[in-house]
Amino acid sequence: MTTLNSELLIEPEMFRSNISYIKNRINPSSKFMSVIKSDAYGHHLESIVKDVDDLSDGYGVVRTDEALKIRLLSKKKILLMQGIYNDKDYKLARENNFDIVVHNSDQFNLIKKHNNYENLWFKVNTGMNRLGFDIDEFMDIYNKYLTSTKFTLMTHLASSNDPEAESNAKQFSLFENLHKRLHADVCLSIANTGCIMNFPEKSYDWVRCGIGIYGGYLNDPNIKTAMTLRSPIVNLRSISKGEGVGYDGRAIADKNMKIASVYLGYADGLPVGIKDGTKVLINGSEAQIFGKVSMDLTTIDVTNLKECNVGDWCEFFSPSLPISNIAKSNDLISYYLMTSIKSRVKKIYKNIN
Ligand SMILES: *Cc1c(COP(=O)(O)O)cnc(C)c1O
């Protein structure tokens, strides 16, 4: 064994192939916004900008400090997807040519004060009930200030991953009916990854794609997980039928078994609630988590593995073991797993070949 460390390998080739695949689904005239908020969903913001800049028409973030980092690396459009909350951020956004989302009247008052209506995106609430103007409230602003201004109208779907959800049709129809009341130069944006995949005809002027770039989208095997979370086996032991493994004896051997302890636990970002039976990969073969995840260790049933030694890597997710598998089998979402990895895991960002 070389070093005792868990690793997060990031493969930018995967971002590129995922983006190309997703772009093939959308209207050729739609622009592609790479959503790289929250440190590019845990994949390292600054590295990714260099590797996807030629494939992106713009970037979406929520924090001004992230937008500033991108501006040093790219001249493309940068959208502050939750807008700005004070004069200082307003000034900073204008100085750096960021586009600004306006989602409520406090934010609009800030804009109004500076009397500059360029590069604005107005977010309307069509049923998510989180951010966005109600339709009537937006129409008041529109009639007073925006009738001859170019802007983008946006909204966000609550259930884009579920093509059957009734809320989607309701949200589309509210959005489209509103659009009909506006002048012809207004741009539209509604699609996140789930919407692009399930309703590609709704790609309009801008798609805002996050999870698909990183490969966390559930329902399409062509989209590949770009990060590998792996850690070495540090101990192997045989146990007899009836013995318990790990805290609270949650896992009880129903036969004689071989158990591997892997050097990664919830302090590395693997959720403590991960269930027995969750699949991992060791030397290319599937094995299962067996026993409660502890702070620094996770126990794996390797009884059926032909090849398994101390020092071998155990992969929790990777391009060959989609992150959506572990998410789905544990009632989690891949967004959560990607953004949960802790700093003590060694992050290795590979170079593009
Ligand atoms: C995060 C975010 C997205 C990206 O969503 P994905 O499901 O990751 O594609 C799109 N739009 C807004 C406003 C967001 O905040």
Image (tube, grey):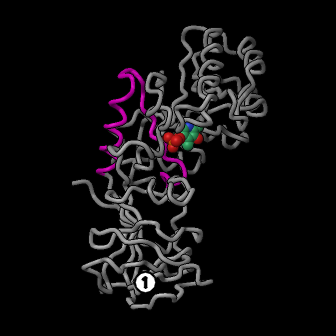
Q: Position of residue 142 (x, y in %)?
A: 71, 15
Give residue 266's quadrant in the image. bottom right
Residue sitting farthest toward the left: 353
Q: Which residues are magenta?
A: 13-41
- Which residue occupies 67% across, 15% down? 146
Circle 1 residue: 255
How busy is the neighbourhood of tag 1: few (under 14 within 10 Å), some, or many (20 plus)? few
From where the camera sits, is residue 266 visible?
Answer: yes
Q: Position of residue 176 (x, y in %)?
A: 60, 16
- Which residue occupies 49% across, 23% down? 202
Confirm if mark 1 falls within 8 A of ligand 1: no
Q: Is residue 40 magenta?
A: yes
Q: Position of residue 93 (x, y in %)?
A: 60, 38
Please tell me which residue lies in front, 230 or 115: 230
> Which quadrant is the C terminus positioned in?
bottom left
Q: Position of residue 107 (x, y in %)?
A: 73, 33
Disc 1 marks which amino acid? Lys
Q: Is residue 66 magenta?
A: no
- Which residue occupies 39% across, 55% down? 322
From where the camera sits, is residue 96 visible?
Answer: no
